[in-house]
Image: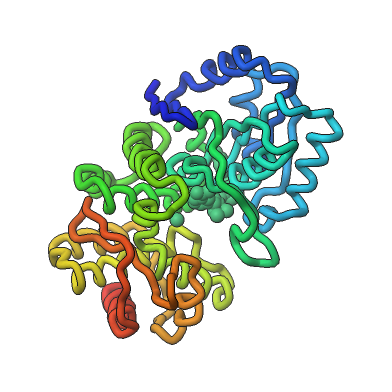
Amino acid sequence: MKEIIQKDFEIYLGAEILEKLSEILINKEYSKIFILMDTHTHKYCWPILSPYLVNYVTIVIPAGEANKTLKYAEFIWEKFQDNFADRNAVLLNLGGGVISDLGGFCAATYKRGIDFINIPTSLLAMVDASIGGKLGLDFKSIKNSIGLFQHPKYILINPLFLKTLPEEEIRNGLAEVCKHAIIDDLSLFEKLAKKAELNWENAGNLIFQSLKIKAAIVKKDPEEKGIRKALNFGHTIGHAIESYSLINDKKPLKHGEAIAIGMICEAYMSHQLLGLSGKELNEISHYFLSRFPKYKREINFADLEDFLKNDKKNAAGQINFSLIKKIGKVKIDINCEDALIEKSLEFYTKLSA
Ligand SMILES: NC(=O)c1ccc[n+]([C@@H]2O[C@H](COP(=O)([O-])OP(=O)(O)OC[C@H]3O[C@@H](n4cnc5c(N)ncnc54)[C@H](O)[C@@H]3O)[C@@H](O)[C@H]2O)c1
Ligand SMILES: [Zn+2]
């Protein structure tokens, strides 16, 4: 079993996490154990976990981002209260990022905070959402607008859960795995570029290398005042494209698909502004174009302008970017001319034609 022990939380990865969980629950002597899952993780992941638990209360919510809401937060708090949860109770979040964001939020606010343990079951949650302590829910259609920072006590990762994760969800997480490589680790990028596909059997080491990067950045800057912004590479343009697609497409782009496009555009901007080599720009572009669906629409700056200008990462009215000097070397707080953003979108359109 691989591990990362930090002051606020511990991460364990491997098939042994199931026994590890039993051990933690016995040692901590929690007064009550709650398990939050969605309808999919209840069907596919709960049968793997349940043999390791005794005396618990399950809470199941419908799957999907549409349920990361106050309504389901109330539903979860109600379950805590109806089952007499006291401050020594614990919540296990068994699921993807929706479950860890929402469950973490409910646990961190119930009776001013009970412990929670993340058992991520999507690739995106294993390398990204379950780590870093950002918790919250969507409010009046604005994503993650209500929330707080609080770390889980433990993050227990078993790649076996990926066995039932749909292909497009694997790809969704892969975009973040690759983002971590691009901002911090050339050798990880090279490994990913060589791998035809990532699955539950071969993913363990790559997941560990990737989450180690996020954990180290979060440790340096827990509340995103500085270097944590590095994790936004590809996300300034990516989020704007994601929002644009949500309004304009019948089947909107998934987060990972949108940030894959964002990373190509922002790599182009890095080439123009920070001297990222043409060779590395091509490698990054090729990686995403060969693995992610191409966006059918031709998008330009005017389509994205409002989204870009409303981005919460901006300061003093300037659109803020995290770009790279080379693969593995990131630079934060870069402002770019609108014309360069337009050119980066043209670059993507030409490549994906
Ligand atoms: N807190 C953070 O730092 C952070 C970072 C990134 C993303 N997020 C949040 O995470 C969410 C996205 O996470 P996600 O992509 O995991 O979404 P998700 O939780 O909706 O999971 C995606 C889909 O996969 C299903 N699923 C999960 N594990 C499965 C398994 N093992 N087998 C079969 N199906 C399975 C889910 O039921 C769901 O339908 C968003 O709400 C985003 O805002 C948070
Ligand atoms: Zn992301």
Depth check: give the residue in front, 164 or 281: 281
The percent position of residue 311, horizontal first and vertical second, equals 48, 70
Quadrant housing residue 69: bottom right
Residue at the image position 27 percent from the left and 53 percent from the top: 182
Q: Is 226 rendered above or below residue 58? A: below
Q: Quadrant of the N terminus?
A: top left
Depth check: give the residue in front, 313 or 77: 313
Depth check: give the residue in front, 140 or 158: 140
Residue at the image position 61 percent from the left and 35 percent from the top: 94
Q: Is 352 rendered above or below residue 133? A: below
The percent position of residue 233, horizontal first and vertical second, equals 35, 60
The percent position of residue 238, horizontal first and vertical second, equals 42, 66
Residue at the image position 75 percent from the left and 49 percent from the top: 72
Depth check: give the residue in front, 322 or 341: 322
Q: In the rendered image, is residue 220 in sight?
A: yes
Left or right position of 218 against 335: right
Q: Is 183 rendered above or below residue 81? A: below
Q: In the rendered image, is residue 198 in sight?
A: no
The percent position of residue 346, horizontal first and vertical second, equals 30, 81
Residue at the image position 41 percent from the left and 44 percent from the top: 218
Ligand 2 is found in the corner quadrant, namely bottom left
Quadrant housing residue 281: bottom left
